[in-house]
Amino acid sequence: MTLVLVAHGTRDPAGAVVIEEIASLVRARLGGVPVRVAYADVRQPDVTSVLSSVSGPAVVVPAFLAAGYHVRVDIPAQVEASGHPDAVITDPIGPALLPALLARLTEAGWTLGDSVVLAAAGSSDPRALADVRAVATALSRRVGPVTVGYAATATPHISDVVASASGRVAVASWLLAPGLFHQAVAASGAAVVAAPIGAHLRVVEAVLLRYYEARCFQDVA
C-alpha cells in the first residue's frame, strides 16, 4: 500500500526540505513501500494529483498537529476528487508528538521558571483549537503553567501573549516545519523560541503508526 504523506505546504523552501526529510526517513523504515509527498495547500503536488498517479491501495497520512479545516474538509475533498478507488485517510499525527515538542523546547534553552507559551498555527475550527489546548495542558504537567498563542487566524496572537507574560519567556513551537507561521513565532519577542518539531524520530514513528493502523484495518475489513 502506497503511503501518501500530506503536509500543509509553505512557500519557504526550508519547509519543503523538512517534509522531504521526514518522507525519506519513513521510506527507509518501510523498505520497498512507495512513499509519496503531497500538500494540502500552497505547494504542489496536491493530494489529488498524487493519488491520481498511484495504482493500488493507498494510505493518506495527514502530517498535521491538529484536526482543522485541511484535515476534516480539504484533504478528504482532494482524495475524492482524485477518483482513487481504494484510499484510506488516517487521523493526523499530532497527539503522539508531545515528547518531540518538549525536546525542541529544551534544546532551545528553556529552563525551569520560564514563562512558557505554546505557539500554534491557529484555525477557524474550534475542534482544532481544542486539540491545541489539550497539548498545552499536557505540556504544563512537564514544564509548569502554559499559555497558548497563535500565529494566524485564531486569537490571542503569539506576540500579544509573549508581551503580556512575566519574566523570561520561552515559546514551544507546535509547528511541524519552517514557514510563515514560524516566522511569526520567531518575531514574537520571546527570549527563547524553540524550532519547529521537524524530522524528529517521534514524527517518523507517528507516521508509521498511522500507516500500520490503516493497513491492519484494511486487512480486517
Image: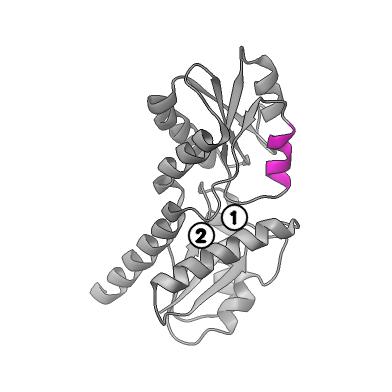
Residue ID for mark 1: 70
Res. 171 image quadrant: top right
x and y percent of residue 82 in the render? 58, 77
Residue 33 lies within the magenta run: no
- Residue visible at 52% across and 56% down in the picture: 199
Q: Is residue 18 visible?
A: yes
Q: Which mark is residue 19?
A: none
Residue nearest the observer in this picture, 187 or 7: 187
Chain part drawn in magenta = 180-187
Query: Dot 2, crowdedness within 10 Å: few (<14), some or many (≥20)?
Result: many
Q: Residue furthest left?
A: 220
x and y percent of residue 102 in the render? 46, 37
Callout count: 2
Query: Dot 1, crowdedness within 10 Å: few (<14), some or many (≥20)?
Result: many
Residue ID for mark 2: 62
Q: Give the quarter of the figure containing the N terminus.
A: bottom left
Residue nearest the observer in this picture, 13 or 218: 13
- Residue visible at 48% across and 53% down in the picture: 200
Query: Dot 2 lies on which element?
Result: strand
User: Circles 1 and 2: CB distance less than 8 Å?
Assistant: yes
- Residue visible at 26% across and 76% down in the picture: 219
- Residue visible at 59% across and 55% down in the picture: 70
* Amino acid found under the numbered disc labelled 1: His
Q: Residue furthest bottom?
A: 55
Comparing labels 1 and 2, the label whose residue is closer to the camera: 2
Query: Dot 1 lies on which element?
Result: helix
